[in-house]
Image (cartoon, rainbow, N blue to C red):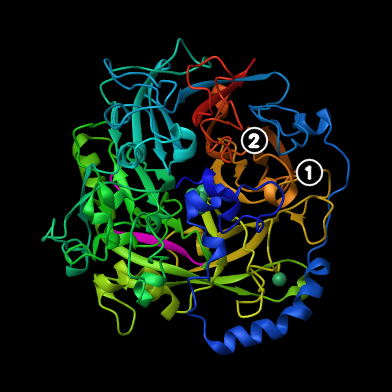
């Protein structure tokens, strides 16, 4: 049965706000918001105290952070004052049924690459009936999320595009009645990542994909990966097909990611649990959402490893949930899964080089309600000499290091600001477990359980994390948490101050002494999102007009230190199409949110990549027209009737100065 056959019966039908599609909840996150919160680790005392405190705290929240934004529109004068290389007047709010990309006056958009575009000669283009397993394995994949556009050094006309492909929507991709095994094999090929050479006529021009470009590559749900780090080879990672526990096929449900200073791509495996049929009887499975209702896509019909109830395959789900690293310059290289960074539902991996020590630090969020923020610190130092040997050295840095999880402590609300101090709690150090009762490989494979034992702070869905190139501060998007403060769930705290947080917030972290390897930090809530007129919102202290914003997800910085925030869930939270916003993080306009674009109906804004010096903004438009079907599309982006495939196609777009 397809999702469209049964939409009204989907678990989240009737439970989403506004026009948020229950299909997105079902296909991407396996209805995670409908199910019990996996993190049941907080003790009874904490739950009961939190619940009792809720009524008092709820009453305080609105007054605690003053709602500051005036209810007026932004003016051209205010936009010019930003002094950006991308000057723009913010677009107005886009109702959540508009099937168009909207950009500011003076800008235009065009697709760079779309689902189904062939990366190689001889590969068929998308047909009216979609694609095939063999073609999809050599075409651009579905539902692009993390994105980077990397111009070659010294060239203005050539570069490499890397995108990952989070999940598939078979209702849109295939006509009714398509064979289930055919769909499963195609969907496996539509997941993963794409590496594509791109070219253009000169600076500021539109990038185009190069068919047969030397780096061109598809990584799919079946591509071989090597396991690296302390848990590689662990009995917890061994299966009948891989008795050594070191070689895994495929990467799944890749969400946000990061680009390393040595030019490789990191990508987080997020809601990978949904592809596996599991008994779901142990805490180690339940905490990751693994259970008997998994694998609706029936991938086990074409590959038995997706049935993790079978003897010999019970560890297969342990081989997903990692940060993967891909070298886009070497299409023959074997990509790596890094066990030293822990196994969670990784949302992103943002890399910083610690100035004092030269060590590599990777920040990564775990996107589920009441999960945690982590950071990894490499044992060895980054080599910035630029030689080929240095690059090979740097590509091994994530094999070995220490893993930490964050605990946030508020300093009290009487100061009128949500802020406080924090510590990074070690989970592994010097190749040893720091968690009582857990071995090193257990900490790395069951990282959520380890972090709970060490009393990390449960956050409102930590999504992307980015480090400011100007200030070195670390920004984390907490997208929302509909369960915060409900009976039996953790209550509000200063780092997660709103009950049933539907709009999300952005945390600003300052590492002690400006060192990314520090064990201590201070923090404050930089944005408390929502419609500017609603109580409890906060915009970095800025008191002028701002664009409404909700459900911050992916983050990026431009060269001036402005934070660009893409959203996932604005239709549900504030009734607007998802968007890309720009917000200053310093100076007079710190906290001023201005909307740069909105994406078509049903879509989420991913990427983004900001080449402000080049006058370009890139976003990955994911799941346009999510609620539709092959026969009845609800979006026509980006071809709008001009292509043979009539439905929507997830695509990377470039916005340039007109
Ligand atoms: Fe795939 Fe957390 O978004
Ligand atoms: Ca405070
Ligand atoms: Ca995301």
Q: Is residue 376 magenta?
A: yes
- The correct choice, above or below, for 487 with respect to 504 in the image is below
Residue that extends furthest to the left in the rendered view of this protein: 243
**Whole-number angstrom distance, CA of label 1 to CA of label 2:** 23 Å
Query: Which residues lie in the magenta part?
Result: 371-383
Report the number of numbered marks: 2
Give the side of residue 130 with respect to residue 219, left or right: right
Secondary structure under the numbered disc 2 in the rendered image: loop
Q: Residue at x 42, y 44 (%)?
A: 258
Whether 280 is among the magenta residues is no
- Residue 467 in sight in this render: no
Q: Is residue 578 left or right of residue 340?
A: right
Tell me if 533 is positioned left or right of 417 in this view.
right
Q: Nearer the viewer, mark 1 or mark 2?
A: 2
Residue 214 x/y as whole percent: 25, 21
Q: Which secondary structure class fits the magenta region best?
A: strand
Residue at image mark 2:
601
Say if mark 1 contacts mark 2, CB within 8 Å.
no
Q: Nearer the viewer, residue 570 or 82?
A: 570
Residue 196: x, y in percent? 35, 26
Nearer the N terminus, badge 1 or badge 2? 1
Q: Residue 543: in sight, yes or no?
A: yes
Taking the spot 60% from the left edge, 77% from the top edge, the residue there is 489
Category of crowding for the residue at label 2, using alpha-carbon neighbours closer than 10 angstroms: few (below 14), some (14–19), many (at least 20): many
What residue appears at the point 84 percent right and 52 percent down from the top-left corner? 533
Question: Where's residue 622, x and y in %?
Answer: 52, 37
Q: Quadrant of the C terminus?
A: top right
Q: Does residue 156 sit above or below 182 in this rendering? A: above
Q: Position of residue 545 (x, y in %)?
A: 83, 43
Q: Which residue is mark 1?
A: 546
């Amino acid at each position: 049965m397809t999702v469209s056959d049964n939409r009204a019966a989907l678990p989240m039908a009737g439970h989403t706000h506004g026009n948020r599609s229950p299909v997105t909840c079902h296909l991407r996150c396996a209805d995670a918001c409908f199910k019990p919160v996996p993190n049941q680790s907080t003790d009874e005392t904490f739950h009961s105290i939190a619940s009792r405190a809720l009524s008092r705290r709820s009453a305080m929240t609105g007054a605690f952070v003053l709602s500051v934004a005036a209810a007026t529109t932004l003016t051209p004068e205010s936009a010019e004052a930003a002094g950006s290389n991308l000057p723009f007047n913010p677009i107005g709010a886009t109702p959540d049924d508009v099937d168009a990309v909207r950009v500011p006056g003076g800008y235009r958009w065009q697709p760079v690459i779309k689902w189904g575009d062939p990366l190689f000669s001889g590969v068929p283009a998308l047909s009216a009936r979609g694609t095939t397993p063999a073609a999809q394995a050599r075409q651009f994949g579905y539902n692009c999320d993390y994105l980077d556009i990397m111009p070659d050094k010294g060239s203005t006309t050539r570069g490499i595009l890397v995108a990952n492909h989070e999940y598939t929507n078979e209702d849109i991709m295939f006509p009714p009645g398509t064979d289930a095994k055919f769909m499963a094999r195609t969907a496996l090929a539509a997941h993963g990542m794409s590496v594509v050479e791109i070219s253009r006529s000169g600076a500021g021009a539109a990038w185009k994909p190069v068919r047969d470009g030397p780096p061109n590559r598809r990584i799919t749900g079946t591509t071989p990966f090597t396991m690296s780090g302390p848990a590689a080879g662990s009995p917890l990672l061994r299966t009948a097909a891989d008795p050594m526990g070191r070689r895994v096929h495929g990467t799944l449900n890749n969400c946000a990611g990061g680009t390393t200073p040595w030019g490789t791509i990191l990508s987080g495996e997020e809601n990978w649990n949904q592809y596996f049929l599991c008994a779901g009887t142990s805490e180690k499975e339940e905490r990751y959402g693994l259970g008997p209702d998994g694998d609706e896509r029936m991938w086990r019909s074409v590959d038995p490893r997706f049935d993790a109830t079978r003897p010999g395959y019970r560890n297969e789900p342990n081989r997903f949930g990692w940060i993967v690293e891909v070298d886009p310059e070497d299409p023959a290289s074997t990509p790596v899964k890094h066990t030293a960074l822990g196994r969670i539902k990784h949302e992103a991996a943002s890399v910083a080089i610690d100035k004092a020590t030269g060590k590599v630090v990777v920040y990564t969020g775990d996107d589920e309600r009441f999960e945690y923020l982590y950071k990894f610190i490499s044992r060895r130092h980054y080599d910035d000499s630029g030689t080929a040997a240095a690059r090979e050295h740097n590509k091994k840095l994530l094999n070995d290091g220490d893993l930490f999880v964050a605990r946030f402590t508020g300093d009290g609300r009487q100061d009128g600001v949500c802020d406080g101090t924090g510590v990074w709690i070690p989970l592994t150090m010097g190749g040893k477990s720091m968690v009582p009762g857990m071995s090193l490989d257990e900490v790395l494979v069951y990282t959520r359980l380890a972090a709970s034992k060490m009393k990390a702070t449960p956050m409102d869905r930590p999504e992307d994390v980015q480090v400011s190139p100007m200030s070195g501060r670390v920004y984390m998007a907490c997208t929302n948490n509909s369960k915060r403060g409900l009976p039996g769930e953790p209550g509000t705290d200063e780092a997660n101050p709103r009950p049933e947080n539907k709009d999300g917030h952005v945390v600003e972290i300052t590492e002690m002494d400006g060192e990314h390897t520090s064990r201590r930090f201070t923090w404050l809530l930089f944005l408390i999102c929502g419609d500017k007129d609603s109580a409890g919102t906060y915009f970095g202290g800025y008191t002028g007009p701002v664009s409404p914003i909700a459900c911050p997800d992916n983050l990026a910085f431009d060269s001036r230190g402005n934070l660009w925030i893409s959203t996932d869930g604005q239709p549900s939270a504030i009734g607007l199409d998802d968007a890309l916003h720009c917000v200053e993080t310093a100076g007079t306009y710190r906290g001023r949110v201005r909307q740069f674009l909105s994406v078509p109906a049903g879509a989420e804004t991913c990427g983004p990549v900001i080449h402000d010096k080049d006058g370009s903004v890139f976003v990955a438009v994911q799941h346009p027209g999510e609620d539709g079907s092959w026969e009845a599309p609800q979006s026509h982006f980006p071809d709008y009737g001009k292509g043979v495939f009539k439905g929507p196609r997830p695509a990377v777009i470039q916005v340039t100065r007109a």
